[in-house]
Amino acid sequence: MLELATKFKPDVDGPFQAAVDAGLRAAELWTGPEVLDHSEEVAERARKFDLRYALHFPTRRDLSQRHLDGVVGLYRSLGCRSMTIHQLEFDRYAPDLLRRDASIVLAVENSHLAPAQLAAWAEANRHLTLDAEHVWYLTHPEKSLGEVLAVFRALLERYAGKLRHVHLPGYWIGQDEHRPMYFARDFVFPVLSLLDEFGFEGLVVSETDVQYQTPNDLRMDALLFDTWKNKRRHA
C-alpha cells in the first residue's frame, strides 16, 4: 500500500525527529547546492532515523559535477527508490546522472503545464512524479473537485504504470499552496483512494511550507492518513 511521507531540508536533525515523533516512516529530502556540498554528512544524519527516503533534485541549472556526484551518492547511500526532478533539470542533467548510475529512477514532476501539456508530460517521460496540487492549482484552476478528480482518473488509467512518486498537499480553490493535507480532507481522501485503486505503492508526500513542518501539523496529517486507511479497509 502507498505510504505517507513529509518533505524537508535535511540540514539538521530536527525535521527528521519531528517526522519520526509524528509517526511517519518516510521522507522526501529537499536538496540544493548547500545540501549536496555536504552529502556524506547528510547521509550520515539521515541514517540515524528509521525512515524510508526519496530525493528531490535541485530546481536550478547551475550545478557542478561535484553536486551531481553528491546527489547520486546520497541516493545510493539512503537506498532511495526514486528522485523527483523537474523537466528543465531532467533535460539538462539526466544524461550525466544516468552515466553515473543507470539504475536511478528519475521521476519527472508536472509543474506549470496547460491541459494539453499535461498529457504530453505523462506520455514523454518514462517515470513520473504526480503533483496533485499542480494539476488543480496550475493546470485546471477553473475546474470543480469532481472535474479535477476525473482528470486524475484519466491520467491514472493511461499512466499509472509510470507513476513513482506523488505530491499531495491539502489544496483547495482560492487557498495558498503547500498546506497540510488535513486542511483539505475532501480533496485528499478521493485522491488517495484513486491512487490505491490503481495500485500505487510509492510515497505520497504532504509537501508543505516550512511554517507547517511542525510536530502538530505532521501528526495531524499522519492521523488523517490513518483515518483514510481505516475507512478504505472497511469500505
Image: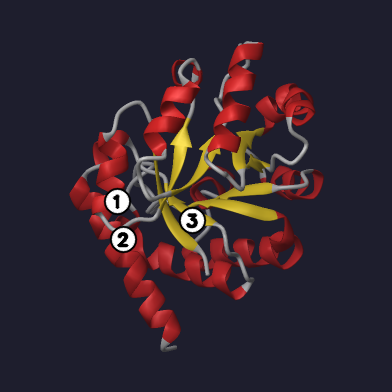
Q: Residue most toward the bottom?
A: 234
Circle 2 is placed at which residue position? 222
Circle 3 — which element? strand
Instruction: Please tell me which of labels 3 and 1 falls first in the chain.
Output: 1
What amino acid is at disc 3?
Val
Q: Residues within 10 Å of mark 3 (few under 14, many from 20)?
A: many
- The tag on residue 204 is 3
Circle 2 — which element? helix
- The tag on residue 20 is 1
Please state if 157 lies on the left or on the right of 205 as rendered: right
Q: Are marks 2 and 3 in contact (CB under 8 Å)?
A: no
The span from disc 2 to disc 1 (Cα, nearest Å) is: 11 Å
Rendering quarter of residue 187: bottom left
Name the one closer to the observer, 224 or 37: 37
What residue is rendered at 48% in x and 49% in y? 133
Task: Give the vertical position of 233 relative to 14 (above or below).
Answer: below
- Percent across and percent down for residue 134 are 53, 45
- Percent across and percent down for residue 3 are 47, 61
What residue is rendered at 40% in x and 75% in y? 229
- Percent across and percent down for residue 28 are 46, 42
Rendering quarter of residue 108: top right
